[in-house]
């Protein structure tokens, strides 16, 4: 079958084809660069196994690793290499050692010829469509000088182009930056850079960037990825502008009339709501109330909890709503516990995107942003990432609820770890206040972009009957300070909790 030069071939790596705009342009030479431990060899094997699944002959050229080491890597991912040809350099070195004392040439020149010539012979014998050379560090060291190295690379390039191969050249980032002076980067059709960082606590974070790709568009910037059993999984950076959708901005009810009155009829579909409050004021319960109300309408919700385990949420929800367990079993409500030390922001976005696009989820709850902040330690990065995520969810018509704990319990001012209130369409404020020797809670809507809302402060209460919202506290002032004064008249407070 004749294949167009402009055709792109899949890499076999989930998410990477999306970053590459569909895959790698066929009949090109591409560099995969990174320090040890970033998954370069695994990526190369996935590329060849994908070709094998599509009926394309592959060849793995191992210059720094033995066949046994390559097979061990494959076995750790549960792969069977089958009849995939693996050419290793070890036999050539054995021949060189015997001939070193009998030649008038420098041993490096002999070694370089003895390294490249068998590669060409093996490629002509196997006639592969996909080739991986791992790694170029051996050729660079044997070349000894930049001019000879460049000539060797030009020879490789011309050889592969004549045979219409698609080639991945694997190289160490440290070697490339120190020795090549950019020689290699000017001769290739594309460059994929793999990086890793190890935080003071938690798992290693990995990300990749496509720095160059001739003959095709690609998604720029960094993209998180993980090395799992089964290979690399890439989480493309979310670009909200690529996901427009037309939807009806209908109200989203909480099933609590007083709360809907406070919000001028309820939240609106496609908006984001930030719930602020001190620890224990009821933020999680309030967010869950909207999820339960949505489930009763037959709509799906997913709650991503950072601090609360699934078991704790289930016990609390069952005490507040008798039908909560039934909604969990039916799948209309799903609770996902997130460990910020293990889950990268890119992976979280990918999970949310999958829930929205594949499971048709109409409500997303992130509880809380304090835990989310731990997975994105750079505040500027958090704001940009959250802005893109909220814009994407808004364009998909998803109602989003974000919880954030404030520092302190009482007082007119309470700090937050990062100010994201301006990103939200609606802001609900939960506060403690003291009255008659008892600590109670209040709720107020301090912002709503999408329509009118009350400017009042109402009492907020959790009990065996669920969430209750009282009448406006018009007989008191200073509620937000935590120590209100009573102006007299009939008290508007709710009866004691049951």
Image (cartoon, rainbow, N blue to C red):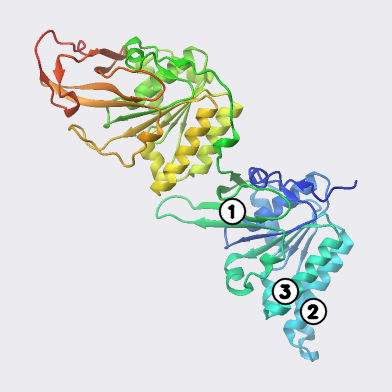
Name the image quarter holding residue 142: bottom right
Q: Give the crowd class for mark 1: few <14, some 14-19, many >=20 residues within 10 Å.
A: some
- At mark 3, the secondary structure is helix
Q: Nearer the viewer, residue 329 or 174?
A: 174
Q: Is any part of residue 323 visible from this angle?
A: yes
Regarding mark 2 in the picture, which secondary structure is present there? helix
Which comes sooner in the sequence, label 3 or label 1?
3
Spatial CA span between label 1 and label 2: 40 Å
- Give the residue pinned by disc 2: 95
Q: Which residue is drawn at 15% across and 14% down?
A: 475
Which label sits on residue 150?
3
Figure label count = 3
Residue 78 in the figure: left or right of residue 122: left
Q: Residue 209 carries which label?
A: 1
The one of 424 and 376 positioned closer to us in this rendering: 424
Q: Quadrant of the C terminus?
A: top left
């Amino acid at each position: 079958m004749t294949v167009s030069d402009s055709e792109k071939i899949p890499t076999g790596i989930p998410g990477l084809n999306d970053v590459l705009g569909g895959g790698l342009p066929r009949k090109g030479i591409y560099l995969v660069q990174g320090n040890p431990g970033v998954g370069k060899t695994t990526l190369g094997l996935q590329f060849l196994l994908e070709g094998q699944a599509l009926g394309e002959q592959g060849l793995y050229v191992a210059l720094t690793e033995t066949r046994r080491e390559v097979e061990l890597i494959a076995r750790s991912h549960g792969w069977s290499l089958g009849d995939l040809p693996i050419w290793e350099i070890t036999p050539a070195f054995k021949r060189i050692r015997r001939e070193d004392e009998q030649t008038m040439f420098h041993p490096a020149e002999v070694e370089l010829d003895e390294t490249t010539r068998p590669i060409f012979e093996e490629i002509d014998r196997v006639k592969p469509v996909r080739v991986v050379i791992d790694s170029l560090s051996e050729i660079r060291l044997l070349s000894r000088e930049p001019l000879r190295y460049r000539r060797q690379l030009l020879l490789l390039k011309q050889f592969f182009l004549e045979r219409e191969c698609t080639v991945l050249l694997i190289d160490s980032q440290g070697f490339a930056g120190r020795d090549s002076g950019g020689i290699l980067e000017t001769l290739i059709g594309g460059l994929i850079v793999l990086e890793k960082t190890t935080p003071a606590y938690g798992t290693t974070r990995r990300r990749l960037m496509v720095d160059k790709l001739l003959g095709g568009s690609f998604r720029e910037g960094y993209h998180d990825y993980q090395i799992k059993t089964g290979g690399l999984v890439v989480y493309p950076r979310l670009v909200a502008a690529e996901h427009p959708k037309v939807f009806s901005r209908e109200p989203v009810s909480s099933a609590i009339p007083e709360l809907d009155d406070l919000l001028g009829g309820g939240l609106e579909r496609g908006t984001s709501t930030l719930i602020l409050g001190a620890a224990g004021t009821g933020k999680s319960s309030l967010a869950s109330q909207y999820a339960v109300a949505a489930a009763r309408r037959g709509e799906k919700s997913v709650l991503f909890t950072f601090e609360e385990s699934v078991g704790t949420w289930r016990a609390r929800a069952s005490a507040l709503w008798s039908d909560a367990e039934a909604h969990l079993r039916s799948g209309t409500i799903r609770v996902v516990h997130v460990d910020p030390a293990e889950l990268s922001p890119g992976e979280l976005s990918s999970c949310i995107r999958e829930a929205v696009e594949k499971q048709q989820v109409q409500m997303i709850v992130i509880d809380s942003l304090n835990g989310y902040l731990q997975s994105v330690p750079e505040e500027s990065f958090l704001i940009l990432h959250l802005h893109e995520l909220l814009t994407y969810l808004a364009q998909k018509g998803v109602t989003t609820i974000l919880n954030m704990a404030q520092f302190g319990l009482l007082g007119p001012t309470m700090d937050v770890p990062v100010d994201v209130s301006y990103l939200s369409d609606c802001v609900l404020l939960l506060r403690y206040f003291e009255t008659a020797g008892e600590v109670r809670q209040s709720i107020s809507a301090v912002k709503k972009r999408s329509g009118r809302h009350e400017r009042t402060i109402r009492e907020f209460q959790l009990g065996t009957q669920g969430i209750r919202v009282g009448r406006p506290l018009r007989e008191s002032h200073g509620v937000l300070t935590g120590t209100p004064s009573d102006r007299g008249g009939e008290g508007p407070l709710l009866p004691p909790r049951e």
